[in-house]
Amino acid sequence: MVGTTVYIAGGYGVVGSNIARHIRGIDQEIRIIVAGRNPAKGEVLAGQLGNAETAYLDLSQPDESIDLDGVDLIVAALQDPMDKLLHLAVEKGIAHIGITKLADEITPLMVAVLKSPPKRPIVPLGHSQAGVMMVVAQKVAEQFSRIDSIELAGLFDENDPMGPMTLNDAEGFINRALIRESGRWLWVDATKNTRSIRLSDGTVLEGGPMSLLDVPGLASATGAPNIRFDFIVGPSLGLKSNQQPSQDLYIDIEGILKSGSKEKLRTVVSDPKGQAHLTALGVLLSIERILGTDGLPAASGGIHLPETLLIVDKAIARLEQFGVGISTYAYQEQTIQ
């Protein structure tokens, strides 16, 4: 898109660099700024991307040090504890995507945008892989007339490279978590509310719940009374196939199909290029909708979530185009010893 500038905070990091490459993969005209505290580290990436440059960004410094002139969209691929980039985006009429806020961290954002309604889209992507799981779960849910439970799990392979932001976040992943149980919202101690999850190959792993936005998002989209997301660690499908570690997501939905039969469907989403690649794809889906590079009018201002922003079928087609495997089948739960 000629004349459009995307500013990626943390743009030369593990996730940020994947976002930048995905953008360039679909559009040669978008100007990309990769920003961070050590701009020299991003120069090689900027050269590879073309029509790109580096910028200095230190969120511990005053706002005046952050140059956003001409920027159309900020993608925060790093922690922004004081929401500096968010507030600057609202103030300057710039669209904003953030990928770090969990369910119990969303309140300051909501208060801020209620006070100053944003002129451009503001998209918090505190979802599994920046909205990928949400989109796929919505598509599978279309097969049901009634949904009784949605059990989600994201598997992290320790051999899959992680950036420092994700590594630091991992310490707080298994903490207090929001789940939906029998129609009630519960905040639970994740360490005391674990779940045994049987993978497709029969392997059983213990997972702990996380407060991802997929949980309230799917409750709103489907009305399911029981929903939880669990974080599990173990060898991925890619590693088990003697290839590089993959990022694997498991979506189990149980209820009454539109055909009238009671069924439990399992959907496995697997990206052979790993978690950073898949997270960046989730961000790309929102970028395309915000800018209108998907052939549809650009998204309007206000707060958006993947479930309200994205067109499900187009989003899934884009994921598959980038090599993400998605398979759904009837799942018969075995007794876990």
Image (cartoon, rainbow, N blue to C red):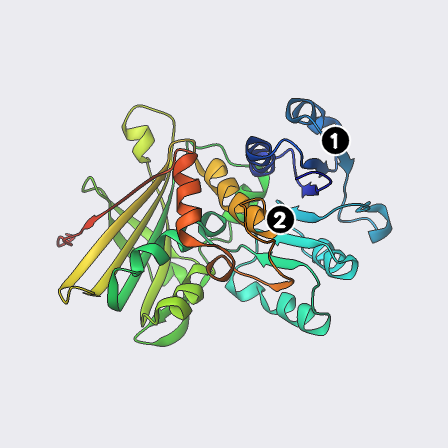
Q: Nearer the viewer, mark 2 or mark 1?
A: 2
Q: Is residue 307 left or right of residue 33?
A: left
What secondary structure is marked by label 1?
strand
Q: Is residue 233 left or right of residue 255?
A: right
Q: Is residue 245 above or below residue 278?
A: above
The residue sitting at the right extreme is 64
Q: Dot 2 corresponds to which residue?
A: 291
Q: In terms of image quadrants, where is residue 19?
A: top right
What secondary structure is marked by label 2?
helix
Residue 37 lies, in percent from the top left, at: 75, 37
Q: Is residue 278 left or right of residue 298?
A: left
Image quadrant holding the N terminus, namely: top right
Residue 209 lies, in percent from the top left, at: 39, 58
**Number of other residues with Cα within 10 Å of mark 2, as a class: few under 14, some 14 to 19, many 20 or more:** many
**Number of other residues with Cα within 10 Å of mark 1, as a class: few under 14, some 14 to 19, many 20 or more:** some
Spatial separation of the CA atoms under disc 2 and disc 1: 20 Å
Which amino acid type is marked by label 2?
Answer: Leu
Q: Dot 1 corresponds to which residue?
A: 53
Residue placed most toward the observer, 10 or 321: 321
Which amino acid type is marked by label 1?
Answer: Glu
Q: In terms of image quadrants, where is residue 123?
A: bottom right
Q: In terms of image quadrants, where is residue 259?
A: bottom left
